[in-house]
Structures are given as C-alpha cells and as structure tokens.
Image (cartoon, rainbow, N blue to C red):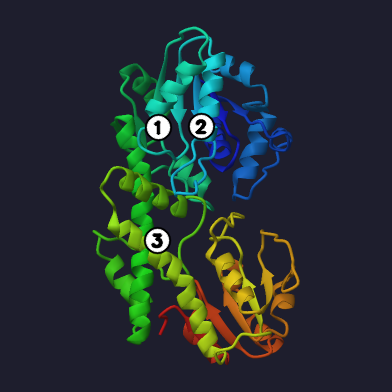
C-alpha cells in the first residue's frame, strides 16, 4: 500500500518506518525543511534507540521518501496518516490547529477516494471535526473515510512497541475503511479492537491517564511509607505481583513527565469538565505529580541543613526518562528550576540532552567533572550508565558524599557501604 505520513516527528517517523518494515511504500510529509533534509540524508532529528539504523536502511532501499510537496504527496497516496502535534492549550485542552490545517490541505488536493487516519492524540469528537474540515477544503466532492488509530508508543522503546504492539485500535464507522486498515496491519500479531472513532479516541486518553494514575498512586504512597520507615520498593513488589495490578509504573520517583502523560491527563480533565462530569481522581493525579518534586527538594533541604544558598549540587540526567532526548515536563528540569530558585550552583550531566548554560547552571561532558566539588548529588534520570558508575571515585571527587536517588535505581546498601549518605524515595 502507498501510505502518506503527515508530520515527521517522533510518532510520524517511527510509524512510517515500521510500515516500511511491513512492506509498504511510505512518504513522509513535513513543512520543516531542516527535518526533511536530515531525514533524506538518513539522519534522525531526535534520539530513539534503533530507529536511526532503520531509517538508513529504508532510505537506501527507497522504501521511504520525504518531501515538502503537499499537493503531490496527497494525490499519490491512498492512506494518509495525520501525525502532527496537538500541543496543550492554556486551559489544558488539546490545540487542534495543526490537525485542522492538514485536514484542509487533504481536502483541497485529494483526487480520489482516500482513507485519512488520525494517529495524533486527539480529543473525543476529532474524527467528526476532521471530516468537516476536509469537506471545507474540498473544491469538488471526493469520497473519503476518516479512521481513528491511536499510537501507544513509549519513548525509549518506540521501535519495539511499534513492531510488537499490545493491541491495534481501529475506530471507524465505515466497514470499507476498517477492512483496508485491517489489511494494512495484516503482518502484526496482536488483538485488534474495532470500535467507533469516539471510543478509539477515548481509549488513548484513558490508557495514558490510567498509567499516570498508577505513578501518582505509588508516589503518594511513598510519602506515607517514608514517614513510617517502610521501603516503598518492597510494597511495589508486593502489590505488583497481583496480576490484577501488575508491576509496571509502580516505581516511586520524582513524578511523571514527557510529551504524553501531562498533556493527555490535562486534556481528559478538560474534556470531562466540558461534559459536566469532572474526573476528581485525575485532578488528584495531577496535584500529586506537581507536589512530588516539592517533596523531594524538601528532603534535600532538610539533609543539607535547611539552607541551599550557594550549595553546589550535581544533577545526573535531564530527559524525563532514560533512552530519550525528550525533556518536556521533565521532573529533573522541574527540580533544577526549584534548586536555582534556592540560589544553588547547579552542575548537570546527560548522555544525550544538551541545555543552555547560565550563570548558576553548568553542563559537563563527563560525570566526574559534574560531581567534582559537589555538596550533594541527585540522580534525576534513570540512565543505565549512572547505575554502573565508579562510585568510589565519585565519592572521592565530591565535597561531601551525599546522594539523592530520585529514581530509586541504586542499591542502597551497596552505596551506603561505600560511605555515602543515601536518600531514595521511601527507600529504607
């Protein structure tokens, strides 16, 4: 099949390359010339393990092409995926401006029956809006169907998630469109959920919101366990072994971040308010997440004598999770902002992410340089390389061996046996 991917960001590029792996011919369309030039040269403009090799493979084999020519791309492809951004608006709702612009362009240039698939995370009712916007853009009536087909990719493991999905959701009122999309996914071996577009759109929001709820639940429980001197890791293990609960997303930390959870939870809350059925549980999820960084920094202040003025604190990790360069809503960056407000001299390191330095924040290329002379060390992102550091050497370089594990990723006893004062999140 000939497939057009509109939007060559994280979701669009990954989706397109996976379809290449399944034997389809793919075109990536984007208005950002820098992105297009990089992708044409076989270079990713973001970090995602394993995806760069796949890009090079399919660009070389000419299974995928990238273009800025909207008219030609729309006319030449039969299935069009909308993978553009839906950023959070001021009120927490999803901004559909990019989706609307794409829909108008599709309507303007479509020359025969097309299936338009919304892969972007969008509010309930967007499929109806896309249908309306395409019709507005049409100069003459051409038949088409709109399908909701949400993505469930995790940054850092997106390629494996896309190649081996837990499920595929197809939301459409057209049996013709459903049959074609089923055929497109024929090489995948997982359950397929067929429903209407509204339910499909809700499934995406509900899934991310539920996972965010698990994270906030374990983080709030960790605060209680910290006061009761209970190891939250033992509690997580104990409840996670219940198959009705499962162990995923039950590791206490500094809160959730990234491009999906914060935005999607807020959007669903806004949808609920507009519908007159507020979701109080999700409102609490957001509150707990916002308070988690405050809880963490208060522990730092207590340990360092209550005043952080001019203290030197090293922060390892800037991305919101390991194996990605995405810093959107990163708990580590939220922590750094609070440290800077306390007039801390912040020293940072990340294997991938680069940030602009300032008068009170300096980034180093090596961990050893980052921790040199530090009064305390914070692990903000769970990169594997931090787990395997030479901690004896790290201790020697620091002004005082105080370590705050914001990801509960280190072996507490091992670190303490080396002479560190270790504090994890209810990691007793």
Q: CA distance from mark 3 to mark 2?
A: 26 Å
- Marks 3/1 in contact by CB < 8 Å: the verdict is no
Is residue 182 toward the left or the right of residue 120 in the image?
left
Is residue 383 visible to us here? no
The answer to whether 228 appears left or right of 352 in the picture is left
Q: Residue at x 58, y 87 (%)?
A: 402
Q: Which mark is residue 286?
A: 3
Disc 1: which residue: 126
Residue 160 position, x and y percent, is 49, 46
Nearer-N-terminus badge (1/2)? 2
**Residue at 40% from the left image edge and 80% from the top image edge:** 426
Picture quarter with the C terminus? bottom left
- The local secondary structure at tag 2 comes to helix
- Quadrant for residue 327, please give it: bottom right
Q: Which residue is labeled 2 in the image?
A: 99
The quadrant holding residue 58 is top right
Percent coordinates x, y for residue 260 in the rendering: 47, 50
The residues tagged by marks 1 and 2 sit, at their Cα atoms, a distance apart of 9 Å
Contact, mark 3 vs mark 2 (Cβ under 8 Å): no
């Amino acid at each position: 099949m000939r497939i057009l991917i509109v939007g060559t960001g994280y979701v669009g590029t990954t989706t397109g390359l996976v379809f290449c792996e399944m034997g389809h011919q793919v075109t990536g369309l984007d208005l950002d010339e820098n992105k297009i030039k990089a992708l044409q040269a076989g270079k990713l403009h973001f970090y995602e393990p394993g995806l760069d090799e796949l890009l090079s493979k399919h660009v070389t084999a000419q299974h995928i092409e990238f273009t800025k020519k909207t008219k030609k791309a729309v006319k030449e492809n039969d299935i069009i995926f909308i993978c553009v951004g839906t950023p959070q608006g001021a009120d927490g709702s999803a901004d559909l401006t990019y989706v609307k612009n794409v829909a108008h362009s599709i309507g303007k240039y479509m020359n025969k029956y097309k299936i338009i698939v919304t892969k972007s995370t969008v509010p309930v009712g967007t499929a109806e809006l896309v249908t309306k916007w395409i019709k507005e853009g049409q100069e003459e009536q051409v038949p088409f169907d709109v399908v909701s087909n949400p993505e469930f990719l995790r940054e850092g493991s997106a390629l494996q998630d896309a190649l081996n999905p837990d499920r595929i959701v197809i939301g459409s009122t057209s049996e013709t469109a459903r049959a074609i999309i089923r055929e497109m996914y024929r090489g995948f071996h997982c359950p397929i959920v067929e429903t209407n577009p509204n339910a499909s759109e809700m499934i995406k929001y509900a899934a991310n919101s539920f996972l965010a709820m698990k994270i906030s639940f374990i983080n709030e429980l960790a605060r209680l366990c910290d006061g009761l001197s209970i190891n939250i890791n033992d509690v997580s293990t104990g409840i996670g072994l219940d198959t009705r609960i499962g162990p995923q997303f039950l590791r206490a930390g500094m809160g959730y971040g990234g491009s999906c959870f914060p935005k999607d939870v807020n959007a669903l809350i806004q949808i609920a308010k507009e519908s007159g059925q507020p979701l109080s549980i999700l409102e609490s999820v957001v509150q707990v997440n916002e308070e988690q960084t405050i809880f963490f920094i208060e522990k730092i202040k207590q340990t360092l004598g209550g005043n952080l003025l001019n203290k030197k604190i090293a922060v390892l990790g800037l991305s919101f999770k390991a194996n990605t360069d995405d810093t959107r809503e990163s708990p580590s960056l939220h922590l750094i902002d609070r440290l800077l407000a306390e007039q801390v001299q912040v020293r940072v390191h990340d294997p991938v992410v680069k940030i602009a330095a300032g008068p009170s924040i300096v980034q180093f290329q090596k961990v050893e340089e980052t921790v040199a002379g530090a009064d305390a060390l914070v692990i903000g992102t769970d990169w594997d390389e931090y787990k395997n550091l030479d901690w004896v050497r790290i201790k020697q370089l620091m002004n005082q061996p105080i370590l705050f594990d914001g990801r509960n990723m280190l072996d507490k006893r091992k670190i303490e046996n080396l002479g560190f004062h270790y504090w994890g999140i209810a990691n007793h």
